Image (spheres, helix red, strand yellow):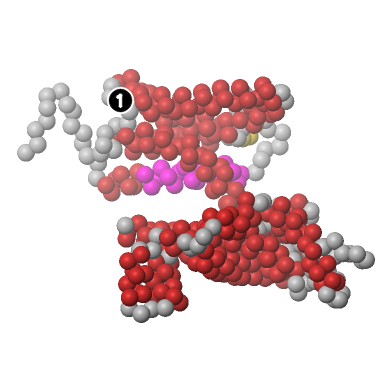
Amino acid sequence: MAVVSPGVTRRRRIPRSVTGAIVAVAAIGIVALFLVLVTRPATTGAVPTSLGFSLNSFFRFLGGLHPLVQIPIMVVAFAAVVAIILVLIEFAPRPGRGYFVLRLAACFLIPVLAFMMLRPLQNATLYVVGIALLAGALLFFADYRAREGSGYVFQLVIFLAPAALLLILGLVYPALSTIWQSFFDKTGKTFVGLENYAWTFTNPDGFWSVINTLIWALVAPVISTVIGLVYAVFIDKARGEKFLKVLVFMPVAISFVGAGIIWKFVYDYREGSQIGLLNAIVTGLGGQPVSWLSNEVLNTFCLLLVFIWTQTGFAMVILSAAIKGVPTEQIEAARLDGANAWEVFRNVTVPGIRSSVIVVLTTITIASLKVYDIVAVMTGGRNNSTVLGFEMVNQQQRFQSYGHSSALAVVLFLFVLPLIIYNVRQMRKQKEVR
């Protein structure tokens, strides 16, 4: 039988079903109020409700100052926010009536201040207060009923809040906004359903951007990884290994823009004397100069060569390190069993570096799906050389077609998503093995 110390009040435990129901009702209420807040029609002539100060007004004020004045102001503002967070983390979880009041006030005031400072809204006072009350009550209830004691959940939320806020504002909100925008026309006002997605796969610009992106994702990772692996195997423990690695790794340090400019000179085509290296060789051998980047059959593969040139060094470095991690005992045992160099490579080395090969393949594939700079610098997407990453920006900046741009972004996201899921699963498997 449990003994309760004198002066200690034993809390009455709330059943889990009741706790779950309270949390569910509060969460539904918060979501409902937020949806009403952002979807309700704006009132003509209404003045935004604010505290007289918002982040928008702060950054506008900051933008009008001299850069040398902006820096100390930003440092002071950042230090003030960090100080408030540290005070709440340090003092709020402590026992006592004063700290209890501090937690209670913080639970309700922080959501209100966050809403009002991030985006002042017209006639939104009731909605903001309602969301703040529900969010504060939910946080306070969860904190009060925590098994670890009052203050534990509060401290945990304060720790996570800055990172979570940045993720929501910089990742979650833009992603949801892009998906929403993809169902509207270029002005963003008229709902068009799936027309933008139909345009992506039927219009020549959208169609070729999808096809070329798939070509990039299938060809570039395989060739880069194969060349990097072969090079890593042949120079492993060779004389001058470090120097040979540096030669191949140097293109990795060059930006895609720089690589595009370099190779644009290589592919250069003009009437008369040729300054492009490739056409100089062709004409030197008696052939006719070729417009490499204007040829609809060749241009995509010419661009791919530039990307492969920049990624082979990355593959080589990762795989070379993985090869050195293969136990020498296994290699020596295979040789004692009579295995030749190819059999040792196929049956011992490759299985030993399988996880590294997968990481290299998926990393280069994701990079190839997001490529923009090489296409923009070398062809500008002309002659059916466009890709999703370039066409997405092109539709938004050149044609101001936000619907088409958003649809292309969603399609690109769907291409990248399986690779991310696969990488996460592989990482989990590796952790389980360890």
Who's the residue at 45% across and 77% down the image? 342
Instruction: Characterize the magenta stretch by its predominant secondary structure.
Output: helix
Residue 9 point in image, percent of width and height: 18, 28
Three-letter code for the amino acid on which mark 1 is drawn: Arg
**Is residue 155 something that shows in the picture?**
yes
Residue 30: in magenta span: yes
In this rendering, the answer to whether 159 lies above or below 41 is above
Give 31 or 166, whichever is nearer the viewer: 166
Residue 246 point in image, percent of width and height: 58, 54
Seen from this angle, which residue lies furthest bottom?
338
In this rendering, the answer to whether 198 lies above or below 139 is below
Give 82 or 188, whichever is nearer the viewer: 82
Residue 306 point in image, percent of width and height: 69, 62
Q: Which residue is mark 1?
A: 94
Residue 54 point in image, percent of width and height: 61, 28
Q: Which residues are magenta?
A: 23-40
Q: Callout 1: few (<14), some (14-19), or many (20+) C-alpha neighbours within 10 Å?
A: some
Seen from this angle, which residue lies furthest left?
1
Q: Is residue 163 left or right of residue 71?
A: left
